[in-house]
């Protein structure tokens, strides 16, 4: 089945530093990947849609200059949390689908637990 | 009103019980529907897609009622390993974005 690999699984960083999270589709090409954030006991919230070869589309309320997304190839999207602060601590998850139809399910990466201290 | 609403639970049931979860969605133009399972501190995993005709996968049965904008999941003969959060997910068709419900917590006890 479709596999999405996400790294790192967890990261602890100091306030003010930047953290890069990678999301790779291992056995399929993904022109579109999605980045989510999940706070404790809350649902997944879509942050942005990452489009290969073009700019990402951000959801309302998500700062594009703070959450930099790069989708340079059909199998790799990266999310960089710039100048991280403690309130950015969260579970970040990417997803992609091997199919273009909305009827395809999406596969998720294993997530990255970010703690900013 | 939230786009996708679920009863958060928790549902505490004994092993072997049958349990049903419900979900409603607000966008009548939504195109596809899914149930995902999420274990504590893990990523969501696709449990099953949901079709208007209803579909079954072993102990799991999903149903969609487009007229009422209502989705259900039935779990028969609950196992301890079924304990998780069950997420109702809707693809609205706008850019293939998924909208997640907040999840329903299931705890199966021996």
Image (cartoon, coloured by chain):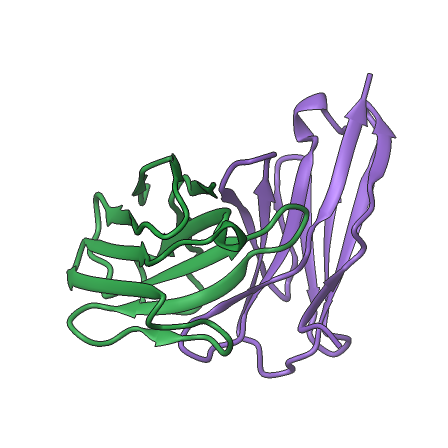
Q: Is residue B53 left or right of residue A112?
A: right
Left or right placement of residue A11 versus residue B19 in this view: left
Q: Which chain is purple?
A: B
The image quarter in which residue B90 lies? bottom right
Q: Which percent across, then down, holds residue B102?
A: 68, 56
Q: Residue at x 44, y 50 (%)?
A: A92
Q: Residue A54: percent from the left, percent from the top?
A: 19, 76
The tint chain A carries is green
Q: Is residue B76 visible?
A: no
Q: Is residue A77 above or below residue A102?
A: above
Please name whichever residue, B102 or B90, is drawn nearer the observer in this view of the structure: B102
Residue A59 visible, this angle:
yes
Residue A72 sits in quarter? bottom left
Residue name at image x 30 percent, y 56 percent: A80
Q: Residue furthest top?
A: B110
The residue depicted at 19 percent of the width and 68 percent of the height is A52
The image quadrant where one finds the N terminus of chain B is bottom right
Q: Where in the figure is residue B21, as x and y percent of width and height?
A: 78, 50
| Left or right: residue A114 compared with residue B38 | left
| Quarter of the view holding residue A44 | bottom right
Q: Which of the pair B67/A57 is nearer the observer?
A: A57
- Residue B40 vs B2, above or below: the answer is above
Quadrant including the C terminus of chain B: top right
């Amino acid at each position: 089945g479709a596999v999405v690999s996400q790294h790192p699984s967890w990261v602890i960083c100091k306030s003010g530093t930047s953290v890069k999270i990678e999301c790779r589709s291992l056995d399929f090409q993904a022109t579109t990947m999605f980045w989510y954030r999940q706070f404790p006991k809350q649902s997944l919230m879509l942050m942005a849609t990452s489009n290969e070869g073009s700019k990402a589309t951000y959801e309302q309320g998500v700062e594009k200059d703070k959450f930099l997304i790069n989708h340079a190839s059909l199998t790799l999207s990266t999310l960089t949390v710039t100048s991280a602060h403690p309130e950015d601590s969260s579970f970040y998850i990417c997803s992609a689908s091997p199919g273009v139809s909305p009827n395809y399910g999406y596969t998720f990466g294993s997530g990255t637990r970010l703690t900013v201290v | 009103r939230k786009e996708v609403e679920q009863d958060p639970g928790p549902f505490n049931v004994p092993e072997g019980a049958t349990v049903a979860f419900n979900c409603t969605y607000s966008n009548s133009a939504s195109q596809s529907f899914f149930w995902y399972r999420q274990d504590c501190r893990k990523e969501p995993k696709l449990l099953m897609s949901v079709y208007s005709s209803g579909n079954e996968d072993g102990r799991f049965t999903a149903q969609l009622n487009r007229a009422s904008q209502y989705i259900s999941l039935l779990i028969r003969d609950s196992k301890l390993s079924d304990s998780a959060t069950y997420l109702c997910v809707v693809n609205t068709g706008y850019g293939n974005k998924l909208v997640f419900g907040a999840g329903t917590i299931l705890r199966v006890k021996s």
